């Protein structure tokens, strides 16, 4: 029985005192839910660290390329393109970093009330991350488009064959369209997830208040 099922069972009790249930079962349900949420958190954070590291490295490279272009006296278009790339990389890195949010603290005690508080902190974190989901998509999209623009800048400035802007331009449009669609789907997922998380948050607060009242 998971936490939601257990909570509904407790709410349906008419003869027993409120929340007078098997505390070991409650603790196990809370710990199982916590383990699931933390696995999802680790997977999500790992997935976001990849574009963050890539974007940071590319931003540094773009910064150096601006200096190289100016030093060598190459056409200004290359310095401008590298500068735009740098700005997009910086925006993408910042957006991805902001979407990570702040991890919930772990230094709770071992009492049942503290278990509930730890679960409540995780739900608060999930709600916070849910609000920032679009930032991660926009950030990754910005890094993707900037990568294509900067690749064109480097290749064109070095007279590498098949480096016309048309090919890279269509690639950038495709990446922008893909992440635009992903942003829309993310908003839909956020809209559906928010009520469930808000309900879980309310239930945990009710449970914590009831447990505190019985002490």
Image (cartoon, rainbow, N blue to C red):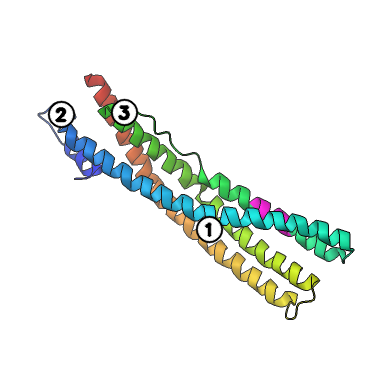
Please report whichever mark, 1 or 3, sits nearer to the chain's N-terminal start: 3
Is residue 165 at all visible to an observer of this figure?
yes
- Give the mark count: 3
* Mark 3 residue element: helix
What separation in Å lies between label 3 and label 2 (alpha carbons)?
17 Å
Is residue 191 at all visible to an observer of this figure?
no
What separation in Å lies between label 1 and label 3 (alpha carbons)?
37 Å
Q: Is residue 17 above or below residue 78?
A: above
Residue 11, percent across and down? 19, 35
The residue lying at 67 percent from left, 62 percent from top is 146
From the viewer's perspective, is 39 left or right of 67? Answer: left
Q: Is residue 41 above or below residue 14?
A: below
* Mark 2 residue element: loop
The residue lying at 69 percent from left, 77 percent from top is 167
* Mark 1 residue element: helix
Q: Which residues are magenta?
A: 85-91
Q: Residue furthest bottom?
A: 161
In which quadrant of the rendered view does residue 8 lie?
A: top left
The residue lying at 76 percent from left, 56 percent from top is 64
Q: Which mark is residue 183?
A: 1
- Residue 90 falls inside the magenta stretch: yes
């Amino acid at each position: 029985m998971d936490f939601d099922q257990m909570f509904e069972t407790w709410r349906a009790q008419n003869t027993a005192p409120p929340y007078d249930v098997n505390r070991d079962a409650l603790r196990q349900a809370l710990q199982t839910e916590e383990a699931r949420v933390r696995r999802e958190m680790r997977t999500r954070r790992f997935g976001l660290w990849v574009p963050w590291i890539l974007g940071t490295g590319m931003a540094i490279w773009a910064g150096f390329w601006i200096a190289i272009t100016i030093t060598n006296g190459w056409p200004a278009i290359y310095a401008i393109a590298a500068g735009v790339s740098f700005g997009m990389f910086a925006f993408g890195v910042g957006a991805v970093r902001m979407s990570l949010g702040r991890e919930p603290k772990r230094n709770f005690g071992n009492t049942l009330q503290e278990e509930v508080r730890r679960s409540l902190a995780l739900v608060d974190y999930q709600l916070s991350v849910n609000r920032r989901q679009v930032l991660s998509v926009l950030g990754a999209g910005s890094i993707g488009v900037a990568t294509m623009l900067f690749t064109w800048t480097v290749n064109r400035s070095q007279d590498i064959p098949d480096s016309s802007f048309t090919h890279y331009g269509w690639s950038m449009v495709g990446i922008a369209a893909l992440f635009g669609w992903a942003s829309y789907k993310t908003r839909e997922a956020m809209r559906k997830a928010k009520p469930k998380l808000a309900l879980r948050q309310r239930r945990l607060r009710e449970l914590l208040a009831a447990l505190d009242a019985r002490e």
